[in-house]
Image (cartoon, rainbow, N blue to C red):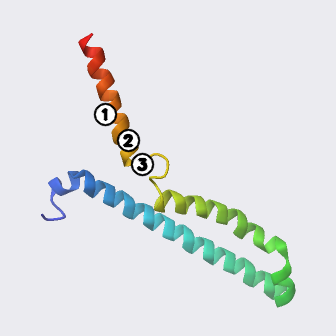
Amino acid sequence: MELNTPLYKEDPEYRRAVKRVKALKGFYGHLAGYLIVNLVILIVSTREEGLLEGLQDLSNYFTAFFWGIGLLAHAAAVFMPNILFGREWEERKIKEFMEKEKQNSWE
């Protein structure tokens, strides 16, 4: 099947794959930004204070630490999306609601 056909774009598996690729791209952009900004902070600090003093100054690591927490949360959302509410949970809930709807419509 051709990738550019409208039928292919309507396929749920295709849409999930596109969504996953966008999530991966977003995470890798976030990671690149994290590395670049924190390297710049470290380089500027070591140039101003000297190598040893710059590396020992704990205030240089606050940005990396707190941003790193956010980066870990982003990684968990991208690489482990099914931990809490995965596709199986969704399907189970949909079936459950459909069954309740069936029972209520017959009463």
- The location of residue 43, given as percent across then percent down, is 73, 84
Tell me the quarter of the image containing the N terminus. bottom left
Residue plotted at (85% across, 77% down):
57
Disc 1: which residue: 95
Instruction: Specify the label residue 1 is tagged with.
Output: none
For the residue labelled by badge 2, is the local secondary structure a helix, a strand or a loop? Answer: helix
The answer to whether the residue labelled 2 contacts the one labelled 1, judged by CB atoms less than 8 Å apart, is: no
Say if 23 sits above or below 28 in the image: above
Residue 90: numbered disc: 2
Q: Evaluate whether residue 50 shows in this view.
A: no
Q: Which mark is residue 86?
A: 3
In-image side of 74 versus 69 (left or right): left
Would you say the residues marked 2 and 3 are in contact, meaning their CB atoms lie under 8 Å apart? yes
Identity, as a three-letter code, of the amino acid under mark 1: Lys
Q: Secondary structure at mark 1?
A: helix
Q: CA distance from mark 2 to mark 1?
A: 9 Å
> Residue at the location (76% across, 72% down)?
61
| Picture quadrant where residue 8 is located | bottom left
Q: Nearer the viewer, residue 107 or 23?
A: 107
**What's the residue type where badge 3 is placed?**
Gly
